[in-house]
Image (cartoon, rainbow, N blue to C red):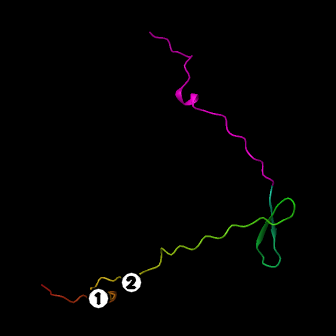
Amino acid sequence: MTALRTDIEPWGITRMRPFPDTAVLSGARPVLDAETQTTVWMDTAGMPLPTMDKHKRSETSKETSPKTSLDGTTDQGSDQQGDTD
């Protein structure tokens, strides 16, 4: 029977490093703007924090008209006219 070796470190532990130092940020507090009735975030000195621009609304949900005819007109709503068996 072989004895287990306890003097070998697992490979993953040999690659670990201490976490880097973190920055401590000052707190921000929400304040209701009486004029616009929206929240304004204030820093500890009472100055408003800059806000990020809002995301543009996606236009991927817009419906397009199908153009499958050779002349570029839409085939939407037209009945199929062709040879029947």
- Determine crowd level at label 1: few under 14, some 14-19, many 20+ residues with C-alpha closer than 10 A: few
Left of 54 or right of it: where is 60?
left
Q: Count the marks: how many? A: 2
| Residue found 47% across the figure and 78% down from its top | 62
Disc 1 or disc 2, which is closer to the eye? 1
For residue 74, above or below residue 20: below
Query: Which amino acid type is shown beneath numbered disc 1?
Result: Asp
Q: Nearer the viewer, residue 35 or 45?
A: 45
**Residue placed furthest toward the right:** 45
| Figure quadrant of the N terminus | top left
| Figure quadrant of the C terminus | bottom left
Residue beneath label 1, please? 71
Residue beneath label 2, please? 65
Question: Which label's residue is closer to the chain start, 1 or 2?
Answer: 2
Query: Which amino acid type is shown beneath numbered disc 2?
Result: Ser
Q: CA distance from mark 1 to mark 2?
A: 14 Å
* Part of the protein shown in magenta: 1-26
Q: Is residue 68 magenta?
A: no
For residue 57, above or below residue 19: below
